[in-house]
Amino acid sequence: MQRRMARLLPVVGLALASMGASGCGGTLYAINASSAASRLEEAKELGAEQLAPYEYYYAKAHLEQAQIDASEASYSDAVDYAETAEEYADKAVNLSKAARKASGR
């Protein structure tokens, strides 16, 4: 009986791992998209639409594309777009802060 269980353990483990992996795309996307949306909102509050327009709108467009891809269950692409959105939202935040500091605000 123990030998039989020992043989089944790797098979059961592989089955559970593959079932768990199928749901990871949506979770990973949700985490990245939420983080990107928060940074984009912060950029907007800092005036990035005027102070860092390229970075702000580039981030916004990528976040919107991430949402479209996620709605089509293309989670790998959605994650990539969300990561790019967060990267450019972060740049917009930094540029906006620097511009505000330079102007004495």
Image (cartoon, grey):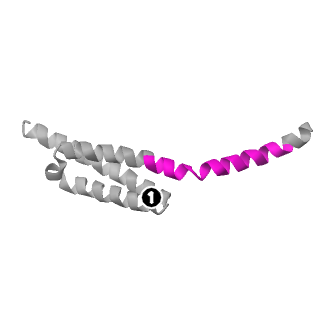
Image coords of residue 88 (percent x, y)? 29, 51
Q: Quadrant of the C terminus?
A: top left
Horizontally, is 20 left or right of 104 in the view?
A: right
Which image quarter holds the N terminus? top right
Q: Residue at x 48, y 48 (%)?
A: 28
38 and 83: which one is in front? 38
Q: Residues within 10 Å of mark 1 (few under 14, many from 20)?
A: many
Farthest residue in the right direction? 1
Residue at screen point 30% across, 59% down = 61
**Residue lying furthest front in this view?**
71
- Tell me which corner region of the image, top left, top right, bottom left or bottom right, holds residue 98: top left
At label 1, the amino acid type is: Ala
Examine the rendered structure and indicate whether residue 102 appears above or below residue 71: above
In front: 99, or 29?
29
Q: Magenta segment: does it hold 3?
A: no
Query: Magenta part of the protein: which range?
Result: 7-30
Q: Which residue is mark 1?
A: 70
- Left/right of residue 91 with respect to residue 80 in the rendered view: left
**SS state under label 1:** helix
x, y percent for residue 103: 7, 40
In the rendered image, the residue lying farthest to the left is 104
**Is 26 colored magenta in this rendering?**
yes
How would you classify the magenta stretch by its main secondary structure? helix
